[in-house]
Image (cartoon, rainbow, N blue to C red):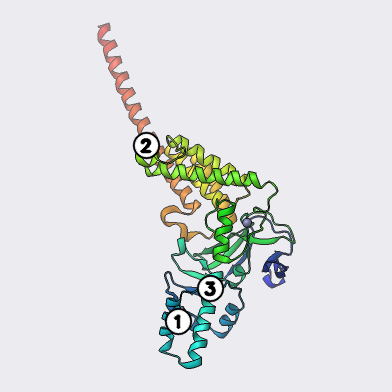
Amino acid sequence: MEDPAAAPALFELRITADKGAGLFALQDIPRGTRITAEDPILVLPPDTALTDYHLHFERMTPDQHNRFSELASVDYTIKPTLMQSIRQRLQAKYSGSALDSAVADCVKMYRIFKTNSVDMGMSGSLGAGIFPLYSRMNHSCRRNVHNTYNETIGKETIHAIRDIKAGEELVTSYIHSSVLTYEDRQETLHKRWGFECRCEACEDPKFEESEQRRQRLQRLGKGIAVYERNDRFLTHFAGQPVPRDDADVLSWWEECVRLFKEEGMVGYNLSAAYRRCSQYALKLGHGAKALAYARKELEIERVCMGDETDHLKEGMEGAKFWIEHLGKLSEQDAVIDRMNQKREGKEDKKAAKKAAKKAAKSKQ
Ligand SMILES: [Zn+2]
């Protein structure tokens, strides 16, 4: 077996003049490459109260504590009432100057956690974790990698979603909503992470075109959401066009696919749009088209997260399982077709017999 330690490193950590630490490719990295798969140094369960953070921090080993403390943080303001609750919780254990430093430590750790943590599982269903390499990655509104917590292997993975050139920075998106316009993105990033974004999309020389694509994607998404609510009142007052039927929705999703590609958003958004195309093609009875879209979804899903997607089986979130589902449906269709053919065959035979009898009678 090849020794992984002997393989040349794909990237390195560099300190930049304007953005602090960042990860940079040391060689050309082809699309679909798994760049890292790392374990968390800390996981907080969903809905952990700030006043309970210290309990988790105290359980870290000295090594984890050191690695955690090295990470950057934003100076979030903490409300006086919350400061008071943290102090009260820690009073059970500390007093005097030890209490002051325990409170200060808890606030420092909270800020590091909030700045660097990433959701684990669907919408953070498994909590939030700190992954040191992920934490060193900077943001871009047009990312070149996809990061995800892969439940099947229990690691946060980072994959190249397009070919990355040696020397390029590896950048992910900190924000969930992919189609925010420039101002909304800047506001969200400034509020949560305290920086002004100067990424490739924000500094795009063809900025207006990018902005129009994102506005169009927002309108398409909103119109489809209203259509799917199936509410006449909402449709009437949507203040924008809404698809008239399922065929319209399919063509709207097809437009989203085109816009995502033009905008360079070729990761998970694109694979999700392919799934919606597949679902609506199926609704319209176009089985072959549904399967073709599902295969495109699967190709991008593998680029974004690899093959280990057993955790995406339930509800068929994973493209592999959606394709299996489509296969079962087409098997059922084939069985029904065969049954229909058989029945029609029997009916034809019956009719032929009847006709033959009639003909024989008329000859007599
Ligand atoms: Zn940006």
Q: Where in the figure is residue 354, as x and y percent of width and height?
A: 28, 17
Q: Residues within 10 Å of mark 3 (few under 14, many from 20)?
A: many
Residue that mark 3 sits on: 113
- Residue 31 falls in image quadrant: bottom right
Please name the residue that numbered disc 1 is placed on.
Answer: 55
Residue 281 in the image: x percent, y percent? 47, 39
Whether disc 2's CB lies below 8 Å from ligand 1 is answered no
Q: Which of marks 3 and 1 is nearer the N terminus?
A: 1
- Horizontal and vertical percent position of residue 5: 69, 72
- Ranked by sequence position, the earlier of labels 1 and 2 is 1
Residue 89 x/y as whole percent: 41, 84
Quickly name the residue at label 2. 336
Ligand 1 positioned in quadrant: bottom right
User: Closer to the camera, 115 or 258?
Assistant: 115
Q: Distance between the residues labelled 1 and 2?
A: 60 Å
Whether residue 246 is situated above or below residue 82 in the rendered picture: above
